[in-house]
Image: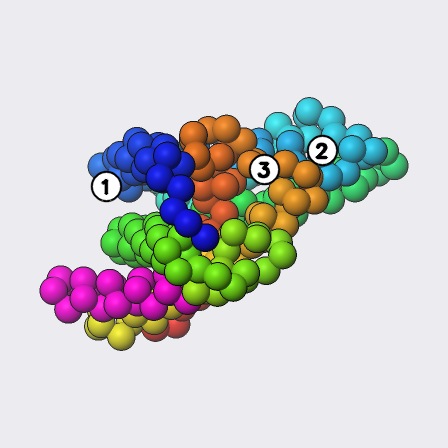
Amino acid sequence: MAMNWPTFFTRLGSAVVFCAVMMAGLLWNEWSFLALVVLIQVLCIREYFRLMKKIYPKYYWPMWLQIAMQIGCLGYLLYYSALFGEYESIMLSAIMLPQFVLMAAALSIQKSRYAAGYAFASFFYLSLPMILLLQMYMVDDLLPLMIILMIWCNDTLAYLVGSFIGKTPLTKISPKKTWEGTAGGIILTLASVAIWAYLKATDYTIMQWVGLAFVVAIAGTFGDLLESKLKRMADVKDSGAMMPGHGGALDRFDSLLIATPFAFIYAYLFMM
């Protein structure tokens, strides 16, 4: 697969702006981080519902169902952020109770039953990873930063390696991905993290960082393939048009959504 230089520079320009916004959210303070994960979740849920409507057009998708899921998932994010002290329980009850009432109502109506089920699934696919990212941030703000950098490193290196030497398709789900690019991205990401961990003194060992990078790279690749499968089912090229050359929020955060739960389990077992 030959390098497409115009596409590369379009993606590069969008990526620079995207990275600046992400770094501001990740590094400024806990409020900017909370705002970042809330923004990610809101954009992803919005695009997720659009895909579901295309995949299952015969089902009824009431707007209030999407709004209910947004409010409920945001309530969980605020609750688990531990930024509201003694008001956590009151706030969670006030936000979540109406959501469960609306979900129960949707499940009881035949024409919106399936839509309600897929809406509820969005919590586990889109909101739970953000909750776990917040949990890791509260333990060590370096962890979510490194997870995101590992994903970027793996995606970029896999794209470059695949562009230059990729010949063997990885899967029909994503024809542009190759075994050479995937393997090269993972290997070079592990090497990059190992060098960084050797040069940078942290509370964790080199092997702990390399292990986390391996989990993130593997799980992130599956996250990318899962979102590609959803797009194929919806018969769309991108989940949205948020970033020229990169698509929408789901296109940009697909790896993070699946990698985060596995990274959390690894970090909980070996790093926290």
- Three-letter amino acid code at the position of disc 2: Lys
Classed neighbour count for the residue bearing mark 1: other residues with Cα under 10 Å, few (<14), some (14–19), many (≥20): few
Mark 1 element type: helix
- In the picture, the disc for residue 53 is 2
Q: Which residue is mark 1?
A: 27
Mark 2 element type: helix
**Relative to 213, residue 130 above or below:** above
The quadrant in which residue 200 appears is bottom left
44 with respect to 201 (left or right): right
179 with respect to 156 (left or right): right
Of the numbered discs 3 and 2, the one sitting upstream in the chain is 2
Q: Which residue is mark 3?
A: 237
Q: In the image, residue 162 lies at what x, y percent?
A: 41, 57
| Region of the chain picked out in magenta, as a range | 183-202
Of the numbered discs 1 and 3, the one sitting upstream in the chain is 1
The quadrant in which residue 113 appears is top right
Q: In the image, residue 159 lies at what x, y percent?
A: 39, 52
Q: Quadrant of the C terminus?
A: bottom left
